[in-house]
Image (cartoon, rainbow, N blue to C red):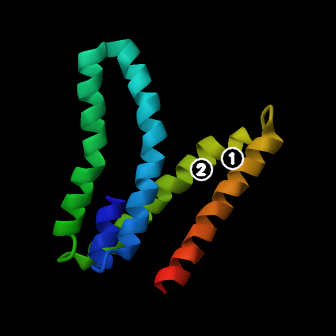
Amino acid sequence: LVVGLTLSVEPSGSLALVTALGVMLHRLPEGIASGSILLDALGKKRARLAVTLLGLAPLVGAFVAAFSLPGLAQLHSPLLGLAAGSLLYIAASDLVPETHGPGGKMNALLLLAGVAFLLGTGHLWELLLG
């Protein structure tokens, strides 16, 4: 959905490309973790089907949003707010509490390193494509 929204907001696609790359990099370890759990629970054939369907879901969402939302400009802001709120919820409920447990200093450092990496990547992208 987020990739489709960025495509519909910026048709040139440079922002959508960065967003898609971020989503793919995020989904890879998530897919590996989900796949291992599903493999244990469902068996090889059904787990492969489930992981394939889970992997295709963001692509379907991106295409639906990219092709249906350009004509619905009034929905861009609420949908981007919903996507941003979801990401903030994940950060607040999953990532930040990890900084208070065992190994919290290292977790906090890695969390901040991830934020710095994303900010640096965004600035580098702006410099290169300006």
Give x and y (percent) for residue 101.
78, 34
Badge 1 is on which residue? Answer: 96
Task: State whether residue 73 appears in this view.
Answer: yes
Left or right for 76, reference 127: left
Decide: is 69 above or below 40: below
Give x and y (percent) for residue 78.
37, 68
Q: In which quarter of the image is the N terminus?
A: bottom left
Left or right for 103, reference 75: right
Q: Residue 91 carries which label?
A: 2
What kind of element bears circle 2?
helix
Left or right for 120, reference 9: right
Inspect the image, locate mark 1, and give the three-letter code of the amino acid beneath it. Answer: Val
Task: State whether residue 82 appears in this view.
Answer: no
Decide: is 126 above or below 119: below
In the displayed orientation, state which residue is furthest to the bottom: 130
Inspect the image, locate mark 2, and give the three-letter code of the amino acid beneath it. Answer: Ala
What kind of element bears circle 1?
helix
- Badge 2 density bin: few <14, some 14–19, many ≥20, Cα 10 Å: few
- Badge 1 density bin: few <14, some 14–19, many ≥20, Cα 10 Å: some
State if disc 2 and disc 1 touch (CB < 8 Å). Answer: yes
Give x and y (percent) for residue 64.
19, 59
Decide: is 48 above or below 75: above
- Mark 1 vs mark 2, CA separation in Å: 6 Å
Decide: is 56 above or below 64: above
Among the two numbered marks 1 and 2 on one chain, the one whose residue lies closer to the N terminus: 2
